Amino acid sequence: MAKKNTYGFKTPVRRTTKNVTGHKVGGTLTGGECELINTQLLELSQSQIYKFEVDQKSAIGLFNNNIGIVAIGGYFICELDIKVKLSITVNDVLTKKVYEIEKKRFYAIGHDFEIDLEEKIENISAEIEFIITNKTKIEYSHFSFGFVDKLEYRENEEAYKHYANSKKTICFPEQFYFTEHFILENSVVGNPIISKSCNRCQRYLPINPYNQRIQLAYSNHCTTKAPCKHKSFSNYIITKSEFTNDKIKNIVNKVFENGYALDSNRNLISYYGHQLECKACKKFFVNAALNHLRTSSQHREDSLRRRSFELLSRKLLAIKWIYHDFRVKTGKEFDKEIWLKFDKKCFNCNNDIKSAKVMHLDHTMPLSHLYPLDESATCLCATCNNAKSDIFPVDFYTGEKLISLSKLTGLPIELLKSRKANQKVINLLKNKIIWFVDDFLNHPEYVKIRDGKKAADSILNSVNKAISKSDTKFDILEEYTKLKD
């Protein structure tokens, strides 16, 4: 068999591990186990408030600073569009967070309130209010409230900046680390869901049974290169089930999305896979411990790869950078116009965005699949933009949202419902393979060796991944070889 010519390019490999977190797996659970359980179900014909008194004696001083944190949250999916308001009241001071929950989409929601435990506390209460206009069914799981009490939070002052930063809601309610769950009055048994183990905190927390890309307590492991072939991340031993074996088979085949399956050993298989750690543990005990240890070369490499995708798409499409081009064409500022187009609100959560400067511009169709930033951009808040990441719109928004997004951005609904790379860019790329390999990838910044790696290798690998999601699949170096021959 002839040796494949790679022309000096290498398949990107992980660097030798230089830094370790110092935190070990928390116990017997490896992150590769799951339970099949039922949600709790409420049938409401009118808006309903559930109020809970919080025991002041359970207050725990955190972050070596006598800070107490009261929190409330859980995972919800509803039959119709509703609003859910989470409220916390301390000494008659009310704080609240309102979520607009779209029908038939799972949400992870939460709200917290910090208390100075040196001050006198008269009363503490938490509320959840379901605001509805029509009779509807509401399912929920892992609902909890009370004081946050995590051992690693108590004496760790450094943990506070990771807990309380502007993106904290991405990890709600996981980072409350509640272990006791509460059932709301008049609840009955609901539908089956999947609860997966975390190898750090040893909790079982839900993954989305209906759409893996709309993530709940865990981030996906493989997205662009799905299906996930890493057994420890995608193969879950069913350690507990409220159903018979025949019932399990029926649930996996007919109730859950087709991204789940059972293997010959009756283990649950996930198409995208999930991280071994829940979002909170990943944030505190992995990322927080290691991110600041990343070398400047690693940060530079990531930045170069993102910028190269934007630059490549624009060069092939023969278009200029959007900010300058938009200003010349219209006399207006691009980011401000997008902000105004979306009525100064986050398109996903509908929360107000104070100014165009704090808005996050989303590519709408992901940059990782060669869609450059243009006038079809979406206005999102920081939390929603981080949650969307490189997810296709069809995997992040509901059907009604997609219709609205199509009207606002001008993108065809068929495109928004697709999971394919930018076919126009890929067709142009295939006609300019020699230029791409010989010129584009040979930019001095891309071929410079940093920590034993070249950005050009990662760029080539990432572009090949995008091509694999198109209608004309091909390998760049194989096409290059044909043209050279």
Image (tube, rainbow, N blue to C red):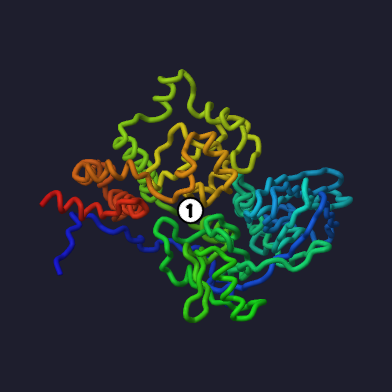
> Foreground residue, 414 or 75?
414
Q: Quadrant of the N terminus?
A: bottom left
**Which image quadrant for residue 327?**
top left
Residue 177 point in image, percent of width and height? 67, 62
Q: Is residue 63 above or below residue 3?
A: above
Count the numbered circles shown: 1
Q: Is residue 278 above or below residue 94?
A: below
Residue 304 shows in this picture = yes
> Foreground residue, 160 or 50?
50
Left or right: residue 367 versus residue 454 is right
Residue 375 point in image, percent of width and height? 46, 31
Name of the residue lying farthest toward the right:
122
Left or right: residue 10 versus residue 245 is left
Could you classify mark 1 by the number of other residues whose Cα lies within 10 Å: few (under 14), some (14-19), or many (20 or more)?
Answer: few
Mark 1 residue type: Asn
Q: Which residue is mark 1?
A: 291
The residue sitting at 58% across, 63% down in the picture is 209
Residue 13 point in image, percent of width and height? 33, 61
Q: Is residue 93 above or below residue 3?
A: above
> Foreground residue, 483 or 63?
483
The residue sitting at 52% across, 52% down in the picture is 395
Q: Secondary structure at mark 1?
A: helix
Name of the residue lying farthest toward the top:
331
Residue 98 point in image, percent of width and height? 72, 45
Q: Is residue 44 above or below residue 414?
A: below
Residue 442 shows in this picture = no
